[in-house]
Every structure is written in structure tokens, then in C-alpha cells.
């Protein structure tokens, strides 16, 4: 495999639990808003697009996919492992819970600048969950994060994620899971 392809594959592999978390939250959705309908100023704190069900199902799916990835890592495919049992839970929970945290912060920011639920906010919509995942990794799995996320991987993730996000959101829109294609 060429070096560029291997970098892209590694970047996607490392971020897959976060990607799965984000897309499962959107796929399953939910009804109970995390902000319980509370307003801050003129706008909702977070909005109806952030639900408890989405949060729980998203994090669960992300961690489960990460565990499955770890069964293959190293053994069958030459891609990084999240660690041995039970230590792999630390990076996996950081990736999944961090993705949801970043998504919440993104919505919080959108409401503060007056954007309604579902209104596009370029780059924030596509990268808020990446920032959240990296924040938790940096705080709680720093060694693993620094080992496996050199600059070329970080750059690959920043470039690939918005493209993948737009693609999956378009698919979500087509299958009727998302109101808008972004
Ligand atoms: N979702 C959820 N709970 C979460 C996150 C997402 O139920 N914690 C679901 C909601 O149905 C949401 C959809 O996933 O509408 C897509 O998520 P996202 O695009 O992040 O939300 P938006 O509806 O665009 O809302 P916002 O403007 O706040 O980003
Ligand atoms: Mg969002």
C-alpha cells in the first residue's frame, strides 16, 4: 500500500469509534432532549437535536465497534490497537464520549450565535466531534494519543472527516434519517 493510502486508512481506523458514535446518534435519534427544553437567552441551551437516547446509543455503538476493531488489530491487519483488556476502554470511551461531548459543544455554540437546529455551520458541524474526542484523549489517554496521532495523521483526519461527514449525512438524508443533507 502506498504511504498516503496507509496514512488515510490509519486515520480512519483510529477515528472509527468516534465516526460510528456520531452516525449512530443520528441514525437512532431520540426524543428526550438533554437540555430538557431549557432556554438560555433567546435560544435553547442545546436544542431538540441532542437527545439522551442518541447520546447513549451513540456511545454504546462506538465502544462496541472499537472492541471489534481491537479483535483484528495487530493480529490480522497491520493497524493500531487500542490496547489490551481492560485498558482499551480508556481510549475507546474517550473517542466515543468525546465525540458526543464535542457534538454537544458544537450545538451549544450554534444556539449561542442564533443558529436553529439543523442550520448548517460549516466546519463546526463536521469537526466538533473530532475536537471533543481529541480533548478527552489528550486529558485521559495522553500517551496513547501522542503515540498514534503524529502530525500527518492529525492532518489526514482534519481533511478526511468533513468529506466523510458530508457523504454519510447525504446518505442519512437519502434514507430519511436526516431532515437536511448536512
Ligand atoms: N441526535 C440525537 N442525540 C444526540 C446527537 C444527535 O438524537 N446526542 C440525532 C438527532 O436526531 C439529530 C441528528 O442526530 O437531529 C443529527 O445530529 P446533528 O446533525 O448533530 O444535529 P442537528 O439536528 O443538526 O442539530 P444542531 O443544529 O444542534 O447541530
Ligand atoms: Mg452536530
Image: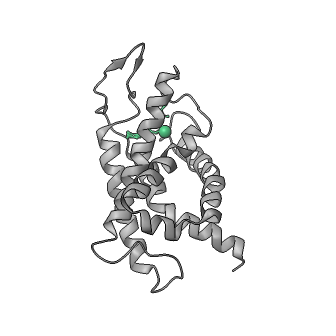
Residue sitting at x 37%, y 63%: 92
Please name the residue shown 54% across and 82% down the image: 78
- Which residue is at a point 57% across and 65% down the rendered structure image? 11
Tell me the quarter of the image containing the C terminus. top right
Quarter of the image with the N terminus in it: bottom right
Q: Where is residue 144 in the image (x, y as percent from the top left)?
A: 44, 68
Residue 35 image position (x, y, % from top left) = 31, 28
Q: Residue at x 38, y 75 (%)?
A: 83
Residue furthest to the bottom? 75
Question: Is residue 26 depicted above or below 157 in this figure?
Answer: above
For residue 134, side relative to residue 168 (left or right): left
Q: Which residue lies furthest to the top in this view?
A: 42
**Viewer-closest of 43 and 133:** 133
Q: Where is residue 55 in the image (x, y as percent from the top left)?
A: 34, 45
Residue 9's place in the image compared with 72, above or below, is above
Q: Is residue 44 left or right of residue 79?
A: left
The image quadrant of residue 43 is top left
Amino acid at each position: 500500500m502506498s504511504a498516503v493510502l496507509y496514512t488515510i486508512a490509519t486515520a480512519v481506523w483510529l477515528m472509527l469509534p468516534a465516526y460510528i458514535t456520531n452516525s449512530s446518534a443520528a441514525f437512532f435519534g431520540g426524543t428526550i432532549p438533554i437540555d430538557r427544553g431549557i432556554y438560555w437567552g433567546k435560544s435553547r441551551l442545546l436544542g431538540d437535536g441532542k437527545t439522551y437516547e442518541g447520546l447513549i446509543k451513540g456511545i454504546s455503538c462506538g465502544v462496541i465497534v472499537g472492541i471489534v476493531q481491537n479483535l483484528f488489530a495487530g493480529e490480522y491487519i497491520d493497524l493500531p490497537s487500542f490496547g489490551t483488556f481492560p485498558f482499551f476502554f480508556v481510549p475507546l470511551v474517550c473517542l466515543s464520549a468525546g465525540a458526543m461531548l464535542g457534538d454537544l459543544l458544537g450545538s451549544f455554540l450554534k444556539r449561542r450565535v442564533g443558529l436553529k437546529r439543523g442550520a448548517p455551520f460549516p466546519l463546526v458541524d463536521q469537526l466538533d466531534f473530532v475536537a471533543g474526542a481529541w480533548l478527552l484523549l489528550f486529558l485521559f489517554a495522553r500517551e496513547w494519543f501522542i503515540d498514534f496521532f503524529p502530525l500527518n495523521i492529525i492532518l489526514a483526519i482534519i481533511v478526511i472527516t468533513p468529506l466523510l461527514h458530508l457523504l454519510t449525512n447525504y446518505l442519512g438524508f437519502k434514507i430519511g434519517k436526516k431532515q437536511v443533507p448536512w
